[in-house]
Image: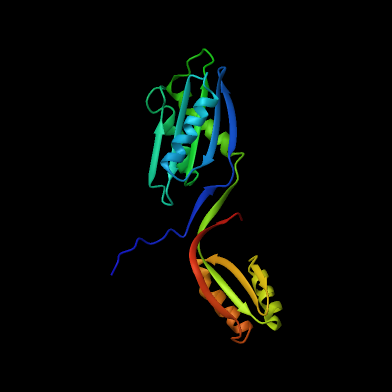
């Protein structure tokens, strides 16, 4: 039998690009955080920020990939070792985020901050950007197709509404609802629909997918 790794049922992701800026002893630390889905995307994002702020001294970065945060990278880009990329990465990991990258651009203000000051500034810039970010949960779920006659439409709509599910609907000779629910809730929903329609509704599992829950 094939040994398949069990799917992560949910993980936290970034829903929008966000920006933040802090100032320490006249040095400006400008942070951008963005959702990325591969090392190539993360590298392209870092290069994009370097070109945008070509006149800055440092462009430090960190990214986290995978539903289990299994791949991480960070760069101090010329700052003393461990004072920039690592604290940035720790903020991303601490927030439980996956598939995300952060770049902090530093414009030097003429005063050295010391290692402790740099750690606080780079980590603080990421925190500031994330304070403006919207996040959601990526959940592992089941897409279901529910076919029924018009007599059962109201019952199914009521049942779905009670669960907070917004279906896609197709109206023809029969009515078809397409819904996506977390994998652990699929069997209970199937049972409820079957009971509510006295077995007249036909339920088909279309596929298992990840979907974003903004709630």
**For residue 55, side relative to residue 43 (left or right):** right
Q: Residue 162 falls in which quadrant of the image?
A: bottom right
Q: Residue 89 falls in which quadrant of the image?
A: top left
Confirm whether residue 121 shows in the render.
Answer: no
In the displayed image of the protein, which residue is found farthest to the left? 1
Q: How many marks?
A: 0
Q: Quadrant of the C terminus?
A: bottom right
In the displayed image of the protein, which residue is found farthest to the top? 110
Confirm whether residue 179 shows in the render.
Answer: yes
In the displayed image of the protein, which residue is found farthest to the front? 173
Q: Percent position (x, y) of residue 123?
A: 49, 32
What colour scheme does the image use? rainbow
Q: Nearer the viewer, residue 160 or 41?
A: 41
Q: Percent position (x, y) of residue 70?
A: 38, 47
Q: Quadrant of the N terminus?
A: bottom left
Q: Percent position (x, y) of residue 11?
A: 48, 53
Which residue is pictured at 64% across the width and 71% down the height? 160
Residue 5 lies, with reference to residue 169, above or below; the image says above
Q: Percent position (x, y) of residue 48?
A: 51, 31
Which residue is pictured at 52% across the width and 48% down the height? 13
Q: Nearer the viewer, residue 180 or 162?
A: 180
Which residue is pictured at 53% across the width and 75% down the height? 204
């Amino acid at each position: 039998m094939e040994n398949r790794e069990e799917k992560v049922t949910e993980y936290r992701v970034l829903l929008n690009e966000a920006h933040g800026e802090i100032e320490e002893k006249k040095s400006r630390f400008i942070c951008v955080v963005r959702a990325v889905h591969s090392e190539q995307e993360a590298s392209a994002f870092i290069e994009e920020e370097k070109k945008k702020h070509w006149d800055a001294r440092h462009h430090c970065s960190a990214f986290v990939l995978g539903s289990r945060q299994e791949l991480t990278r960070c760069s101090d880009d010329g700052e003393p070792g461990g004072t920039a990329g690592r604290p940035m990465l720790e903020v991303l990991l601490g927030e439980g985020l996956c598939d995300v990258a952060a770049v902090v651009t530093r414009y030097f203000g003429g005063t050295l901050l010391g290692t402790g000051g740099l750690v606080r500034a780079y980590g603080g810039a990421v925190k500031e950007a994330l304070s403006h970010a919207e996040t959601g949960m990526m959940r592992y779920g089941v897409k279901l197709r529910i076919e029924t006659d018009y007599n059962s439409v109201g019952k199914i709509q009521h049942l779905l509404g009670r669960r907070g599910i917004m279906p896609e609907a197709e109206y023809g000779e029969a009515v078809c609802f397409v819904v996506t629910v977390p994998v652990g809730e699929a069997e209970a929903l199937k049972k409820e629909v079957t009971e509510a329609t006295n077995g007249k509704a036909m339920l088909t599992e279309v596929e298992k997918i990840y979907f974003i829950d903004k709630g």
